[in-house]
Structures are given as C-alpha cells and as structure tokens.
Image (tube, rainbow, N blue to C red):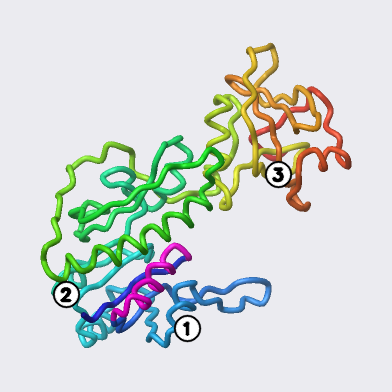
Amino acid sequence: MKIVYMGTPDFAVPALAALVDAGYEVAGVVTQPDKPKGRGKTLVPTPVKEEALKHGIPVYQPRKVREPEFVETLKEMEPDIIIVAAFGQIIPKEILDMPKFGCINIHASLLPKYRGAAPIQQAVINGDKEAGVTIMKMGTGLDTGDMISQASVLLTKDETGGSLFDRLADLGAGLLVKTLPSIFDRTAVYEPQPEESPTPYAGMITKQMGLLDFHKNAEELERLIRGMDPWPSAYTFLNGKSLKVWKAAVEQKASGQEEPGTVTGTDKEGIHVTCGQDSLILKEIQLEGKKRMDAAAFLRGYPIETGTMLKDHKE
C-alpha cells in the first residue's frame, strides 16, 4: 500500500516513524513550509520534515495544499491512503476523495469530545481524568468524520500540556499501526459521530489565554498553569513586569478580606496568592528577563512584600 503522510509538529513524528518501522511504503511526506527563526531569520524545517529526510522520504511543502499544481503532484503519486496528523491546513474535498482508502486522521482526543486544534491542552485545563486519541476517516467537517478506533490514558496529578502531548503522540502512533490492517482488508468498523460534540470546540490556544485571573478559584488556575506548559505559559504581572508561572499548588484557605491577586505571604513553599476561592502557591516562576527558577530561590534575590498585588495588565 502506498501512503502519503501529512503532518507538521513534534506530535506527528512518532506516527511517521512507526509507519517506516512497520515496513509501510511512505511515498511522500507533506508538511508546512520552513519558517524563519531567530535574529538571522534562518529557515528551520518542521519536525516531520526532519524525520522524513532521515528515512530518505520525498518531502513536499506547498504553501496551500489546494493549489492546483500540488493537487496534480499528489494525483501523480497515486496514494492508496493519506494519513494526516496535526498538519495545519484544511484538506479540500478533492484530496479527501482521491485515495482508494480515503484520508484518515490521528486526532488527539476521544471524539466526539474536543473537536478542534487544541484538545490536549483542554483536557488538562478542564481537569479530565482521561484523554486519548482517535483514528478517524476525514470528511469535510472539522473533526466530524467517522471514528475507526480509539485508545486512552489516565492523566497524572501533575500532567502538563507538554507531557500529555508526548504521551498521546506515542499512543497515536501505536494505534495507527494497529488500525491500518483492518482498513486495508476492509474489516474496519466506521462509527458515525453525533452531529453535536458534547464539549465546546477546542480552538487554537493563544497567548492571552494564559493570563491568570485570580478572581477564579485556585484549582481552576492550577490546571490552567499545567495546561499552558510549555506554550504559551500562564502568566501575571508583578511590579509592571511579566511573571510566568510554571508550577503551582492549591492551598485550601477560608476567604479573607484580601482582594484576589494579593500576595498574603512568602516562605519556602513559594508565593501565596489569594484567589476567588482558596489560594494558589506559586512554586516555579520566571520574571521577565530572568531565568525560570524555583520560587524560594527567586525570593532570596527578589523579596516580595505581603500585600503586593499581582495584576492582569502591564502598568
């Protein structure tokens, strides 16, 4: 079977590697164009491109996959199936209908839950007990195609967006290789999804979403901090400077008179901050222009007075 693989970030690398290890013929890899990075604006290849080149697989990087020239190129490759994982572009119907076995997608949620671009972060932010991956047949709707197979994992107490990203990437790779034989011998069962998802659409994560609103309860903010790790990170403002918060703990505490965002004390545990319900102990932080560090170590060089306000804007 001739496979064309479409993917871009780190999440899509294990599945490509698994296809090669399983002996499948990957005729070509389609990924996003190289992006300029750093002061010198050096063009940096995508993680999937780097993996493809390691195996000598031809790489295609169209600006838009719907461009007629690329569609013709894809037709000439005559793929039996197209496999998509976090590619980053909408696949037009002309391409979806092209392969004999259609286009399948490795989606990082237990569909129909969390359709959209950021299901991994949402699972952590929402405090889900489990998360998973779904192998689905792609249709013209966003993540609404028929489900073929699923696998799940339990989230750990300290799960971050980054750690779950890595776990689901490996889980998806294994599930893909297990599922492909049933697709090719036509024994796979395609289960239609309900029209409506039981959860809101998990749209793209933005930097603004990491801003800590201390009027919310501490448990909700602690999950947000983990969900935003490693990108874009959760943050607040201290004395006019951005303060990233990498790790925190919930401190059950009766409501006092302090306004949410007030520092009620500092100690070896970290920086204690009043929230709408309970308090948050900031344990690992990064002040603008400084290195990421343990809060106790930070406090030795940058004392914070009780009563200091952490704010939601730069003064």
Crowdedness near tag 3: few (<14), some (14–19) or many (≥20) residues, C-alpha within 10 Å: some
Figure check: 194 above or below 169: above
Q: Nearer the viewer, mark 3 or mark 1?
A: 1
Q: Closest to the observer: 158 or 113?
A: 158
Q: Nearer the viewer, mark 2 or mark 1?
A: 1
* Amino acid marked by disc 1: Lys
For the residue labelled by badge 2, is the local secondary structure a helix, a strand or a loop?
loop
- What residue lies at 83% left-to-right and 38% top-to-bottom? 299
- The answer for how far apart the CA atoms under marks 3 and 2 are is 49 Å
- What residue lies at 78% left-to-right and 24% top-to-bottom? 265
Residue 274: horizontal and vertical position, in percent?
A: 67, 23
Q: Indicate the quadrant containing the C terminus: top left, top right, bottom left or bottom right.
A: top right
The circle drawn on residue 54 is 1
Q: Earlier in the sequence, mark 2 or mark 1?
A: 1
Figure check: 224 above or below 273: below
- What residue lies at 71% left-to-right and 24% top-to-bottom? 262
Residue 60: horizontal and vertical position, in percent?
A: 37, 82
Instruction: State the extent of the magenta-drawn residues as a range.
Output: 10-24
Crowdedness near tag 1: few (<14), some (14–19) or many (≥20) residues, C-alpha within 10 Å: few
- Residue extending furthest left? 186
Q: Which residue is mark 2?
A: 98
Left/right of residue 90 with respect to residue 251 in the rendered view: left
- What residue lies at 51% left-to-right and 77% top-to-bottom? 45
Q: Which residue is mark 3?
A: 242
Q: Closest to the observer: 284 or 309?
A: 284
Left/right of residue 120 with respect to residue 273 in the rendered view: left
Type of secondary structure dominating the magenta stretch: helix
Q: Earlier in the sequence, mark 3 or mark 1?
A: 1
Q: Earlier in the sequence, mark 3 or mark 2?
A: 2
For the residue labelled by badge 3, is the local secondary structure a helix, a strand or a loop?
strand
